[in-house]
């Protein structure tokens, strides 16, 4: 399954594990912008660690404050691994 494909039935029930906000797929432009910041070492995970690998897809909270990476088609809904977008 390509990273950017999450069945709509699953996407409709996924929520941020911390805020319980609905999630949406990140756009290609949003992923590209984050990868640009990654190249500058400016992307931190919630736990304070630096993101090492380029993003291919992600889920963003309704407020736009946090991104959860999608790896190999699976959403990684771990708070410590989320990326703060604010």
Image (cartoon, rainbow, N blue to C red):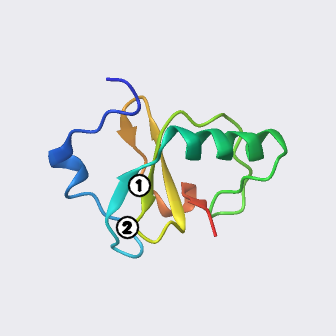
Pick the front one: 4 or 83: 4
Q: Are marks 1 and 2 in contact (CB under 8 Å)?
A: yes
The kind of secondary structure element at disc 2 is loop
Q: Would residue 67 be found to the left or right of residue 43 on screen?
A: left
Distance from label 1 to label 2 (Cα)?
7 Å
Pick the front one: 32 or 57: 32
Residue appearing at x 32%, y 33% in the figure = 5
Q: Residues within 10 Å of mark 2 (few under 14, many from 20)?
A: few
| Disc on res. 77 | 1
Height in image: 30 above or below 64? above
| Disc on res. 17 | 2
Where residue 51 appears, as percent x and y from the top left, is: 69, 46
Q: Residue furthest right?
A: 40
Height in image: 42 above or below 47? above
Quadrant location, the N terminus: top left
Q: Residue furthest left?
A: 9
Where residue 14 appears, as percent x and y from the top left, is: 27, 57
Q: Quadrant of residue 20?
A: bottom left
Height in image: 64 above or below 3? below
Where residue 44 appears, as percent x and y from the top left, is: 71, 56
Height in image: 65 above or below 4? below
The kind of secondary structure element at disc 1 is loop
Q: Residue furthest top?
A: 1
Residue appearing at x 43%, y 47% in the figure = 76
Q: Would residue 55 be found to the left or right of residue 3 on screen?
A: right
Residue appearing at x 36%, y 54% in the figure = 24
Where residue 15 appears, as percent x and y from the top left, is: 31, 64
Residue appearing at x 35%, y 59% in the figure = 23
């Amino acid at each position: 399954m390509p990273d950017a494909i999450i069945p709509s039935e699953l996407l409709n029930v996924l929520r941020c594990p911390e805020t319980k906000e609905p999630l949406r797929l990140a756009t290609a432009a949003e992923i590209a912008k984050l990868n640009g910041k990654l190249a500058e070492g400016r992307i931190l995970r919630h736990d304070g660690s630096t993101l090492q690998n380029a993003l291919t897809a992600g889920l963003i909270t309704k407020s736009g404050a946090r991104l959860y990476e999608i790896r190999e088609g699976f959403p990684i809904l771990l708070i410590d691994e989320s990326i703060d977008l604010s």
